[in-house]
Amino acid sequence: MTENAFTRRDNDNSDSNSNSEDGGRGVGRMTERGAGVAAGTVLVTSGTGKTGRRVVERLTALGVPVRSGSRTGEVPFDWQDASGWAAALRGVRAAYVAYYPDLAVPGAAEAMATFGRTAEACGVRRVVLLSGRGEPQAVVAEEALRGAAGTVEVTVVRSAFFAQNFNEGALLDGVLGGEVVFPAGTTAEPFLDLDDLADVVVAALTGDGHAGAVYELTGPRSLTFAEAAEELGRAAGRPVRYVPVTGPAYASLLEEFGVSGPEAGFLAELFASLLDGHNTATTDEVKRVLGREPKDFTVFAREAAGDGSWHG
């Protein structure tokens, strides 16, 4: 998935818990790569979401002019209303694209094609697209963007599950309640810290040498959800356990919490396809781009606990 409320979706209408983060991490590496398009304005779609706000913070710290797009912000940008995209892209040199609701949903490829054509027409030089790791339908949307964007440089960042789903996303309530309910079985996942993802995105937006690249980003090791729950419990100072459920049972649970039947079914089916073991292996892409190791899940959990994420 790209970034839904449960895995990798940037919901720019939601308020996230604040995390302390070093906005300067990786800055030296980015600068060494060259000025790139840093002198021009960068549009960040879903600019108030989990990844978008981190990208905005880092670009601002670098002195890069930023246009933060969202459905209700100063720069109107709504993935469901293409009529406003040209206005948001006009005068922009680069754009970070975090599509909502998900690159794997019906209509995403068409939206990416429209965005690509609009970006080229507006003179955009570079686009960095957030995508999902190991998602065939997301690849279709990626290719639609590439095919329509013409001369625009496109970089794709495919992400593993966000570690921050446990303190900013839909799994937060489970951690607070001591039970993380999810249809992952015993499959291990190399959870990615969003600080690392944001640093890679900013490097690709502002530096040279990333055009046409596809980066598959993971954390440094893979953990089962049961192991992750144990780590979270140790950091939070209270027991947290993982409760595995079937896909249909999870879909029913989502519906109880107000998710529509079709979306709940889509999410359950998607998790079944993602959590079959084919995404378990780690990659060295974070180190290759930034010149440093990605953040370990234990460090994430300790920092999140220190920030008060699980004091509720």
Image (spheres, rainbow, N blue to C red):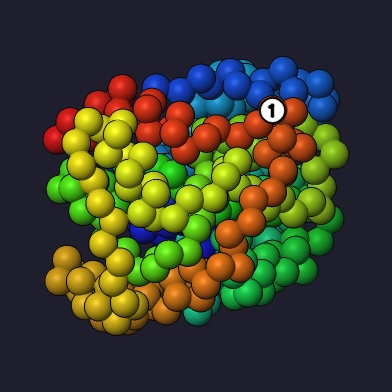
In the image, 260 versus 78, the foreground residue is 260
Quadrant hosting residue 311: top left
Q: Is 177 left, or right, of 181 in this rendering?
A: left
Number of dots carrying numbers: 1
Q: Is residue 23 visible?
A: yes
Q: Mark 1 points at which residue?
A: 292
Q: Is 274 left, or right, of 122 in this rendering?
A: left
The picture places residue 236, in percent across and down from the top left corner, at 25, 32
The picture places residue 200, in percent across and down from the top left corner, at 65, 37
Label 1 element class? loop
Above-or-below relation of 287 to 158? above
In the image, 20 versus 36, the foreground residue is 20
The picture places residue 309, in percent across and down from the top left corner, at 26, 32
Quadrant hosting residue 288: top right
**Residue shown at 49% from the left, 68% from the top:** 275
**Residue shown at 58% from the left, 59% from the top:** 280
Q: Rate crowding at label 1 as few (under 14), some (14 to 19) or many (20 or more) other CA atoms within 10 Å.
A: some
In the image, 125 versus 192, the foreground residue is 192
Quadrant hosting residue 133: bottom right
**Residue shown at 38% from the left, 72% from the top:** 267
The picture places residue 197, in percent across and down from the top left corner, at 58, 40
In the image, 269 versus 64, the foreground residue is 269
Above-or-below relation of 271 to 203? below
**Residue shown at 19% from the left, 36% from the top:** 238
Q: Can residue 55 be seen in this view?
A: no
Instruction: Give amino acid for label 1.
Output: Arg
